[in-house]
Amino acid sequence: MDKLSEGTNRREAFVKLGIGAVCAAGVGAAAFGYEFLSPNVLYEPSPVAIAGRPDQYPVGSVTQDLKAGIYIVHSADGFYSLSATCTHLGCLTKWNADLSIIACPCHGSKFNERGVKIDGPAPRPLPWLKVWLSDDGDLLVDRSTPIPPGQFLRT
Amino acid sequence: MAKTPEGYIGELRSTRAWRSVFRGGIGANNLRRSMAVQQNVFLHLASVKIRRKSLAFRATWFLGTLSLGTFLILVVTGILLMLYYHPSVPQAYADMKDLRFVVSAGVFLRNLHRWSAHAMVFLVFAHMFKVFYRGAYRSPREFNWVIGVILLLLTLLLSYTGYLLPWDQLAFWAITVGSNLMSAVPVVGQKIRFLMLGGNTVNANALLRFYVLHCVILPLAAAFFLMIHFWRIRKDGGLYTGGSDSHE
C-alpha cells in the first residue's frame, strides 16, 4: 500500500513537472516570438524633413510637401508646420487653396490652416510639428515631435 | 469474347498494384462500398451513406460546396501567380502590371483569382445565412458553426491580406486605413499595428508580412479548419435536412 501511494505521488510530481515545463516553454516561445516579430532596425525615412530656405514661402502661403507628408505654413505670425496625415485613419490630406481648407479624401474630414477640425470624423486637430532653422539656414521639421499649437518660428 | 469498358476497369481493379494503393477497392456489396470510403484518407472525411434529401438543391443551395470550389480555384491560381510575383518594393507593382500585360494568360489568372476571391467572400456569407436561417447550427452542429465562424474570419483575413499585394494606391491606402483601425484597440493597439506592419508605416516589411500571411499561414490554417469542418458534417449526422433528422 505504501509503495503504491508513493508511486502515485511520484507520477503526480512528474506530471506537475511536465505541465510546468510546458508552461515555461510556452511563455518562452511567446516572448521569443514577440521579440522576433518586432524589427530592431527599421529602414524608414528619417523623421526630420528638410523644407529648404524660408524665403521661398511667401507670407500667407500654405505649402504641402507630399513626400514628407507635412504642410509648411508662413502666417503673419511666423512659420509653423502641420502634419498632413489625417488624425482619423491616417490618409494623406490635401490643401484646397480656393476654400482655404485642408481636406481628407478618405472620409471627408476638413481642417483650417491652423489644423483645427471644421468637419468630419477626425477625432483630433492636425498636430503642429517642431520647426527650427538649421545652421545653414534651412527650415527643418521633425515629424516625430508634435508641439502645442500656437508656437511660431520667426526668421 | 469482347470485353466491355467495365470489364477492363474490373480487371484493373483486381491487379496487385491497384489493390496496394486503394486497399479493399470498390465492390458490389454495401460492406465493400463503405470500406472504399472509410479506407481512403480523403473520402473518409465524408459519410459512407447520405440522405437523398441532403443532395437536393433546396437543402443547401450548394453554397458550402461552391465556397470550397472558389477556395480550390484560389489555391491553384494563387500558386501560379506566385511564380511571377516578387513581394518587394517597388517590384510588386511592376510584377502585377506584367501579369496583366506581358505574361501569357496572366490577366486571365489574375482576374480569375480576383473574382473568385470576391465570390468566395459572398458565398461564405451566403452559406452562413442559409445555415443560420434554416437553424442548421443547432445541436449537434454547434461546434461546426464555431469552426464556420473561424473559417469566415480566415476568409476575410485572406481577402484583406491579398488586398495589399498589388502595391497600388488603392492597396496602400486601404491597408493604411485598416492598420490604423487596428491601433484603436485599447492599450495594445499601437503594438499590434507595429507587429502587423513590421514598422510604423505601410512599407516593404508590411508587404512581406502580408505576403507570407496570404500565401502560407492563412491558407494552411484555412485548410486545417476545412478538414475539421467536413469531418464534423459526417460526425454530426450528415447535412441538416430540416425538421427531423430521423426520417429520410
Image (spheres, rainbow, N blue to C red):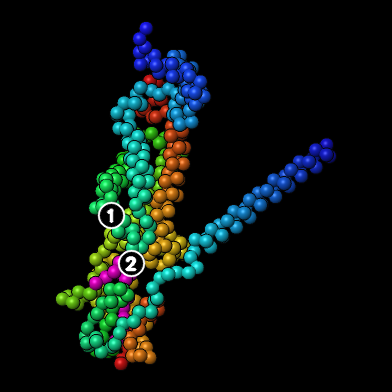
Check disc 2 and report its element: helix, strand or loop: loop
Rendered position, A134 above or below B235: below
Q: Quadrant of the N terminus of chain A?
A: top right
Q: On what subunit does the disc labeled 1 rest?
A: B
Residue under the image location 66 percent in, 52 percent down: A21
| Magenta range | A79-94
Rendered position, A40 above or below B116: below
Rendered position, A61 above or below B36: below
Q: Is residue B230 visible?
A: yes
Q: Residue furthest left?
A: A98
Residue at numbered disc 2: A90
- Disc 2: CA contacts within 10 A as few (<14), some (14-19) or many (>=20): many
Q: Quadrant of residue B237?
A: top left
Q: Is residue B77 magenta?
A: no
Tell me residue A65's x, y (percent).
28, 76
Q: Quadrant of the C terminus of chain A?
A: bottom left
Residue under the image location 38 percent in, 73 percent down: A45
Residue at numbered disc 1: B98
Check disc 1 and report its element: helix, strand or loop: helix
- Disc 1: CA contacts within 10 A as few (<14), some (14-19) or many (>=20): some
